[in-house]
Amino acid sequence: MNEHRDGGNIKWKTSFMLPEHSEALKQIQENQEKVEKPILNQQRFNELSFKISDAMMHNLSIQVTYWFDYKLRTVIGAIIKLDTVNKKLVIGSNQVKIPFDLLVNIKLEI
């Protein structure tokens, strides 16, 4: 029997759920964690461009926050390449390629 006693009352453990219920709860949680893609205005994009230029000129590492698959992700590292043809920023030893239009924030690591 799968029960717990609390002040004389029996509390049943809810460890048994139908797979459909577990999947539905998981889906609800994933939907609640989704973040809509931020849209940067020209001024904000210019600020990010300035930080990229500054980091490249002074060989600084940066912390980049970017949007991907309905989540905000962060990567820290030096700028390996600024690919203006494909509009991507390549960061860190893992060479994470981030499209310019997915950038959310850049912080200089001093």
Image (tube, rainbow, N blue to C red):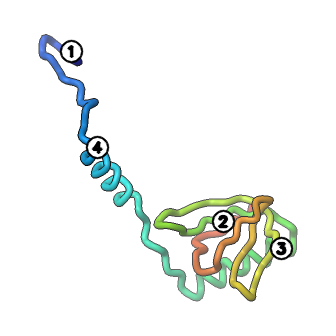
Q: Is residue 47 left or right of residue 23?
A: right
Q: Is residue 37 left or right of residue 90?
A: left
Mark 4 and mark 1: Cα distance apart in space? 22 Å
Quarter placement of the N terminus: top left
**Closer mark to the observer between disc 4 and disc 3:** 4
Residue 110 visible in the current orientation = no
CB atoms of marks 2 and 1 within 8 Å = no
Q: Which residue is mark 4?
A: 19
Mark 2 and mark 4: Cα distance apart in space? 38 Å
Q: Name the residue rendered at 68%, 65% in the picture.
A: 107
Q: Which residue is mark 3?
A: 56
Residue 37, percent from left and from top: 47, 74
Q: Which residue is mark 1?
A: 1
Residue 61, percent from left and from top: 79, 62
Residue 93 disc label? none
CB atoms of marks 4 and 1 within 8 Å = no
Find residue 60 and report its image quarter: bottom right
Say what amino acid the circle numbered 1 marks: Met
Mark 2 and mark 1: Cα distance apart in space? 52 Å
Q: Name the residue rendered at 69%, 62% in the picture.
A: 63
Residue 40, percent from left and from top: 54, 81
Q: Earlier in the sequence, mark 2 or mark 3?
A: 3
Say what amino acid the circle numbered 4 marks: Pro
User: What secondary structure is marked by label 4?
Assistant: helix
Name of the residue lying farthest toward the right: 58
